[in-house]
Amino acid sequence: MKTDTLFTSKLLTKSTTLTIPAHASIVVTTGNINAILAEVLAREKEKENPEPWIDDDITDWFEDKTMPAIDQPFDSTIYRFNESMTHGSILNEAERTGIKKIYHFTEALMIALRGVLAGEVDEKGTGIIAYFKVDGNDQLYRFLAWRFDDGQLFVDVDKVYLGRWYDAGNGACFSNN
């Protein structure tokens, strides 16, 4: 098992560790996703930020699918990018350093939301990524929680395109090794 002293990377800086609580399985519907987002939506309103933009693809792509539960709490660490990076370079560096973790839908969504609640996307122009796969599908996806320059929170899902760039200061969530 790796320890903090063994993690070395010129491309990634180990940052905040998030504790993700256990969570029941999710049958993806607009109502379920809105209920899961309730704490984040309330935080955004309390901070007087613009109403968050939540990607409809979260429900459109995964409508009526049952996503696995999170049986036990776990930790996921944000690794901030020291320079602009593509998904391909992020994933390669995570593999090289032994931190790469591809989550399932529920884990990745909860990581993104916990990152928001922890203030990890409060700075305008920054965000965090959590990679995931869905059973029965080889496609790699990612959730992105990102803050627009006007303060609006953006919670997005997309297929991973290995050549897509992210600016320095953004981060990806991986194992805590």
Image (tube, grey):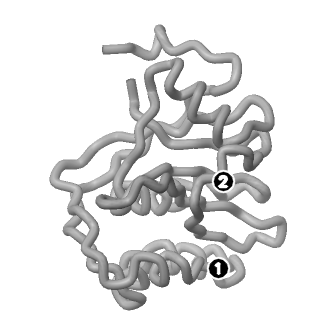
- 170 horizontally vs 177: left or right: right
Please tell me whether mark 1 sits on a helix, a strand or a loop: strand
Q: How many marks?
A: 2
Of 142 and 51, nearer the camera is 142
Q: Which quadrant is home to the N terminus?
A: top left
Residue 97 pos. (x, y %): 51, 19
Disc 2 residue type (three-letter): Gly
Residue shown at 63% from the left, 26% from the top: 13
Element under disc 2: strand
**Relative horizontal placement of residue 49, taking residue 60 as reference (left or right):** right
Please name the residue shown 31% across and 84% down the image.
64
Q: Nearer the viewer, residue 95 or 1?
A: 95
What residue occupies the far bottom of the structure in this picture?
Answer: 31
Residue type at mark 1: give it: Trp
Q: 41 or 67: nearer the eye? A: 67
Position of residue 48 measured from the top left corner of the image (x, y, whole percent): 67, 79
CB-based contact (under 8 Å), mark 2 and mark 1: no
Q: Write the residue at 50% across / 42% down.
A: 173
- Which mark is on residue 53? 1
In the rendered image, the vertical position of residue 63 relative to residue 153, given as above or below: below
In the picture of the structure, the residue carrying the numbered disc 2 is 127
Q: Quadrant of the C terminus?
A: top left
Disc 2/disc 1 C-alpha distance (Å): 14 Å
Label 2 crowd (10 A; few <14 / some 14-19 / many >=20): many
The mark that comes first in sequence, 2 or 1, is: 1
Crowding around mark 1 (Cα neighbors within 10 Å: few <14, some 14 to 19, many 20+) is some
Can you say whether 36 is above or below 167 in the image? below
- The residue sitting at the top extreme is 6
Place of residue 115 in the rendered image (x, y in percent of width and height, measured from the top left): 51, 54
Q: Which residue is at the far left?
A: 71
In the picture, residue 67 is in which quadrant? bottom left
Tell me which residue sits at (64%, 27%) in the image: 12
